[in-house]
């Protein structure tokens, strides 16, 4: 039996809390991580591949182009994805606080708006955000719930233990998720938010709201400053070094039976 969807007030609260979370937590962290990229030590510079990537991106391999090839993927990919993944628990406790679980290993509990049953849910960010080792961890948490239910004589079906993936589609799910789905349902993206809220297009409304926050953020000047600062260090690093004194020092040491780097 399906359940009534959440009230309009509850739906609005989730959206407003999500916007506040991104504005107050995700954006400042993203900016702080971006500023760290002024230092070359944040990267493993590979002059062979990074020059190629720079040419592929901009048409030349000068130090600024190399800096762009290094900075763009980090700022627009790795950094923001890591920040979001690391703060997933905080998102659950602040934005989805009405569903917070006190059960070990479970992030949220909710009555499924499709089948009306109570779900014990482990939350994951996206369709490619777990590795092979996570499979057994997830299964272990669910086994703990089944043991607790057996002890307390609670009726919990295997499909009441679910993995909820915030974004993506079933076709996007990695093989690790598909392995879990053989035992426990993995609900992803639009279906997850529909089962949680009862609002068919809530996923779209939520992502649109996050987009509103993003439209208020312009990091272009910061990124350009980071690139130019990094480019100077790259240029100094790639300058030919005077090897003769270093080699002579090594030879002298080897003559004494010593070896130095």
Image (cartoon, rainbow, N blue to C red):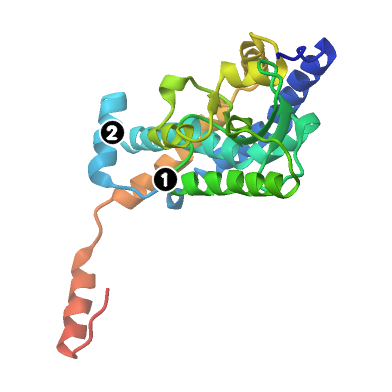
Residue at (18, 89) in percent of width and height: 257
Residue 212 horizontal/vertical position (percent): 67, 15
**225 sits left or right of 200 in the view:** left
Q: In which quarter of the image is the N terminus?
A: top right
Q: In this view, does 94 lie to the left or right of 249?
A: right
Outermost residue, front direction?
153
Counting from the top left corner in percent of width and height, residue 168 is at 50, 22
Task: Name the quadrant containing residue 89.
Answer: top right
The picture quadrant where one finds residue 6 is top right
Q: Could one spot residue 5 in this view of the protein?
A: yes
Which residue sits at x=82%, y=13%? Answer: 7
Task: Tell me: residue 208, above or below residue 60.
Answer: above
Task: Give the structural element (helix, strand or loop) at label 1.
Answer: helix
* SS of the residue under disc 2: helix
Badge 2 density bin: few <14, some 14–19, many ≥20, Cα 10 Å: some
> Whole-percent x and y of residue 19?
72, 23
Instruction: Identify which residue, 138 or 64, lies in the foreground.
Output: 138
Can residue 39 be spotted in the picture? no
Indicate which disc residue 132 carries: 1
Sequence-wise first label, 1 or 2? 2
Q: Name the residue under label 2.
A: 53
Which residue is depicted at the point 63% across and 49% down? 144
As rendered, which of 55 and 156 lies closer to the eye? 156
Q: Pick out the residue farthest to the right.
A: 9
Q: In the rendered view of the protein, which quadrant contains the C terminus?
A: bottom left
């Amino acid at each position: 039996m399906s359940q009534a969807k959440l009230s309009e007030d509850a739906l609005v609260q989730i959206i407003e809390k999500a916007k506040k979370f991104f504005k107050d937590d995700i954006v400042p962290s993203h900016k702080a991580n971006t500023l760290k990229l002024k230092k070359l030590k944040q990267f493993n510079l590979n002059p062979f591949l990074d020059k190629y990537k720079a040419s592929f991106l901009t048409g030349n391999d000068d130090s600024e182009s190399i800096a762009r090839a290094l900075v763009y993927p980090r700022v627009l990919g790795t950094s923001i994805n890591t920040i979001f993944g690391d703060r997933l628990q905080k998102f659950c406790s602040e934005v989805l606080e009405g569903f917070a679980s006190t059960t070990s290993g479970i992030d949220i509990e909710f009555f499924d708006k499709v089948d009306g049953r109570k779900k014990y849910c482990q939350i994951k960010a996206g369709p490619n955000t777990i590795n092979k080792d996570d499979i057994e961890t997830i299964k272990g948490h669910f086994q703990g719930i089944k043991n607790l239910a057996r002890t307390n004589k609670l009726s919990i079906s295997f499909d009441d233990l679910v993995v909820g993936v915030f974004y993506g589609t079933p076709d996007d799910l990695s093989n690790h998720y598909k392995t879990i789905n053989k035992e426990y349902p993995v609900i992803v993206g639009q279906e997850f938010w529909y089962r949680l809220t009862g609002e068919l297009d809530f996923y779209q409304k939520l992502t649109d709201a996050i987009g509103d926050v993003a439209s208020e953020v312009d990091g272009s000047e910061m990124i350009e400053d980071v690139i130019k600062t990094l480019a100077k260090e790259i240029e100094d690093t790639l300058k030919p070094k005077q090897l003769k004194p270093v080699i002579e020092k090594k030879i002298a040491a080897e003559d004494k039976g010593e070896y130095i780097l």
